[in-house]
Image (cartoon, helix red, strand yellow):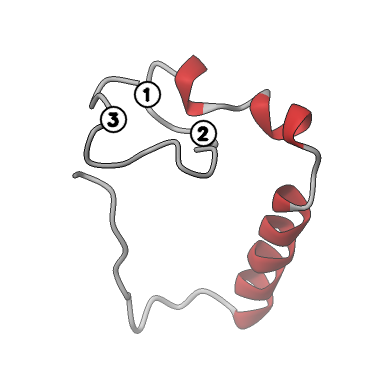
Amino acid sequence: MDIGFFYLLGHGIAQTEIDRLHELGEQFFCLPLEDKAKVDVAHSSTREGYFRPGGYGPTTSSTA
């Protein structure tokens, strides 16, 4: 799979900006499914967007 996570140290991003990003992420994931579906990765030509729970795994096509 080509999705993963990494840690970046010494990036210089202010903690207040990181905290705000986490806050916005929480707000997004608390939205109703209908709202999140508007940015579903299935509608993206760049494979960026929302993956529904169970929506991506080893048997999922690599072309969204």
Looking at the rendering, in which quadrant would you find the N terminus? Answer: top left
Question: Which of the marked residues, 1 or 3, is nearer the chain's N terminus?
Answer: 1
Task: Give the x, y percent position of residue 56.
Answer: 37, 38
User: Is 23 on the left or on the right of 12, as rendered?
Assistant: right
Q: Which residue is the site of mark 2?
A: 49
| Residue type indicated by callout 2 | Gly
Left/right placement of residue 3 relative to residue 30 reads left
- SS class of the residue under badge 2? loop
For the C terminus, the image quarter is top left
Residue in the image at 39% along x and 76% along y: 11
Are discs 1 and 2 less than 8 Å apart at CB? Answer: no
State if disc 3 and disc 1 touch (CB < 8 Å): no
Three-letter residue code for mark 3: Thr
Q: Earlier in the sequence, mark 2 or mark 3?
A: 2
> Where is 51 relative to 23, above or below?
above
Which residue type carries mark 1?
Answer: Thr
Q: Which residue is mark 1?
A: 46
Q: Position of residue 44 (x, y in %)?
A: 46, 19
Judge from the rendering whether residue 21 lies leftward or rightward of residue 32; answer left or right: left
The residue positioned 39% from the left and 16% from the top of the image is 45
For disc 2, the neighbor class at 10 Å (few under 14, some 14 to 19, many from 20) is: some
Distance between the Cα atoms at labels 1 and 2? 9 Å
Q: Secondary structure at mark 1?
A: loop
Task: Please give the residue where the numbered disc 3 appears in the rendered image.
Answer: 60
The residue at the point 72 percent across, 61 percent down is: 26
